[in-house]
Structure formats: C-alpha cells, structure tokens
Image: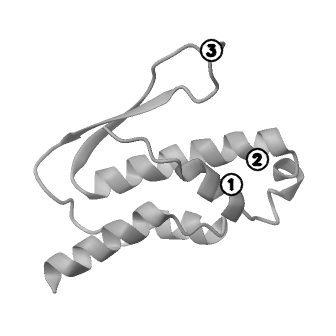
C-alpha cells in the first residue's frame, strides 16, 4: 500500500484553456487535480496487470481525500492498447506524472 502525494504535482502542472474558468478557483483546482491523479493512478495500475477498484473509505465530512485504490495483481501485463487514452488526457491537461515516467523507465530496463 502506498499513497504518494502526486495530486500536488498534478495541481502545479494542470493547465487547460478550455477548463480555465473552472480551474481558476484554488479549491476546485485542488479537487480536480486529486480526482485526476487517482484516475491516472488506477489506469496506470490497470496497465501493469492489476484489477482496480476505486472506493470511498471514509465519509466526506471527515476529509475530502477519501478515495482508496484497491488493486489486485491479475494475470500479468495487459496487452498494449491501440490508442493510449492516458497519453491523450495527460497531453490535453499538460500533465507529466512522475509515476508514469517511473513505470516507463522500469519497463525499458526490463526490455533492455
């Protein structure tokens, strides 16, 4: 179990002209960044061969950061997708997640 603080990275990088009217508000921007971070984490885990669920583990009245990603290793790496929606959304939002880079570096080392 690990909880990296990637939402702060996403909050700093997040840029999208279309969403600017929404992202101009600090609290909204922070929550959007946290949600996008959790969704990207889940997608990266799926790509590594995990079955993934996102669960609410504590009531919102206690903390707004109440999502837990449960991932169970399944039958190995999933086949590469013809299109990479993760790449498309990170480009659209101008995000360059460290977790994605670390996984890509790890895969390159395994192949090389």
Which residue does the numbered mark 2 point to in the structure image? Answer: 29
Which residue does the numbered mark 3 point to in the structure image? Answer: 62
Answer with left or right where residue 76 lies relative to residue 104. Answer: left
Q: CA distance from mark 3 to mark 1?
A: 22 Å
Graded by Cα atoms within 10 Å as few (under 14), some (14 to 19) or many (20 or more), the crowding at tag 2 reads some
The quadrant in which the C terminus is found is bottom left
Q: CA distance from mark 3 to mark 2?
A: 20 Å
| Helix, strand or loop for disc 1 | helix
The quadrant in which the N terminus is found is top left
Answer with left or right where residue 32 lies relative to residue 35. Answer: right
Graded by Cα atoms within 10 Å as few (under 14), some (14 to 19) or many (20 or more), the crowding at tag 3 reads few
Graded by Cα atoms within 10 Å as few (under 14), some (14 to 19) or many (20 or more), the crowding at tag 1 reads many
Q: Residue 89: x percent and y percent? A: 57, 63
Tell me if residue 3 comes above or below residue 111 in the rendering. above
Between 89 and 110, which is closer to the camera in this rendering? 110
Tell me if residue 18 comes above or below residue 23 in the rendering. below
Q: Residue 70: x percent and y percent? A: 32, 33
Give the number of the disc on residue 54: none
Which residue does the numbered mark 1 point to in the structure image? Answer: 11
Which residue is rendered at x = 52% and y = 47% of the image? 5
Which residue is rendered at x = 51% and y = 64% of the image? 97
Which residue is rendered at x = 32% and y = 66% of the image? 103
Q: CA distance from mark 2 to mark 1?
A: 7 Å
* N-term mark: 2 or 1: 1
């Amino acid at each position: 179990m690990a909880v990296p603080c990637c939402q702060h990275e996403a909050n700093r990088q997040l840029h999208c002209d279309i969403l600017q009217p929404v992202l101009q508000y600090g609290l909204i921007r922070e929550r959007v960044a946290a949600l996008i971070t959790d969704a990207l984490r889940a997608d990266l885990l799926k790509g590594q061969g995990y079955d993934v669920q996102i669960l609410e583990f504590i009531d919102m009245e206690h903390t707004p950061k109440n999502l837990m990603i449960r991932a169970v290793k399944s039958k190995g790496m999933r086949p590469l997708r013809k299109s990479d929606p993760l790449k498309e959304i990170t480009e659209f939002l101008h995000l360059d997640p460290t977790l994605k880079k670390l996984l890509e570096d790890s895969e390159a080392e395994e192949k090389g």
